[in-house]
Image (spheres, rainbow, N blue to C red):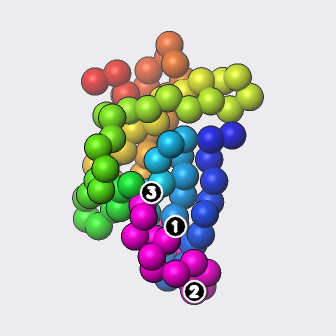
């Protein structure tokens, strides 16, 4: 799959969604981070009250899991939006 949990800790998750690494909050992550700050600073986007992009990212990007293709997009909250290709669920805008 195109997803990887790279690290988590101190209320945050560092995750790879396809080609992009995202740093976003998760209040249930109460342990300490395993990776150094330099690795976390490499995130393509970080959520701090809003998404801050450190690199140019498309509005949505394609991912694939077991030959099921779907779109991923940053939402105004700290969550991501997903929809199957050909079956948009609020991501067609």
**Magenta part, dominant SS:** loop
For label 3, the residue is: 22
Residue 59 versus residue 30 in the image, above or below: above
Q: Is residue 68 left or right of residue 13?
A: right
* Secondary element at image label 3: strand
Q: Position of residue 12 (x, y in %)?
A: 48, 72
Q: Nearer the viewer, mark 1 or mark 3?
A: 3
At x 33%, y 35%, the residue is: 58
Residue 79, how many percent across, how many down? 42, 52
In this view, 47 is above or below 35: above
Callout 2 crowding tier (Cα within 10 Å): few <14, some 14–19, many ≥20: few
Mark carried by residue 49:
none
User: In the orientation shown, which residue stands out farthest toward the top?
Assistant: 86
Asked whether the beta carbons under mark 2 and mark 3 sit within 8 Å of each other, the answer is no
Q: Quadrant of the C terminus?
A: top left
- Highlighted magenta segment, given as a residue range: 26-43
Say if residue 77 shows up in the picture: yes
Asked where in the image residue 9 lies, by quadrant, the reply is: bottom right
- Find residue 53 and report its horizontal and vertical position in percent: 29, 53
Which residue is at a point 45% across and 76% down the rendered structure image? Answer: 38
Which residue sits at x=62%, y=30%?
64
**CB atoms of marks 1 and 2 within 8 Å:** no
Q: Residue drawn 46% across and 36% down? A: 72
Point out which mark residue 32 bears.
2
Verify whether residue 61 appears in magenta. Answer: no
Q: Is residue 89 left or right of residue 47?
A: right
Residue 39, placed above or below residue 18: below
Mark 1 sits on what residue? Answer: 13
Quarter of the image containing the N terminus? top right
Whole-angstrom CA distance, mark 1 to mark 3, is 8 Å
Report helix, strand or loop for mark 2: loop
């Amino acid at each position: 799959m195109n997803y990887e949990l790279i690290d988590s800790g101190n209320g945050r998750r560092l995750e790879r969604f396809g080609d992009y690494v995202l740093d976003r909050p998760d209040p249930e992550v109460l342990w300490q981070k395993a990776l150094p700050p330099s690795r976390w600073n490499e995130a393509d986007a970080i959520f701090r009250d809003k998404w801050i992009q450190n690199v140019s990212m498309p509005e949505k990007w394609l991912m694939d899991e077991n030959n099921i293709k779907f779109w991923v997009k940053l939402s105004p909250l700290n969550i991501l939006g997903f929809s199957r290709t050909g079956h948009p669920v609020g991501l067609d805008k």
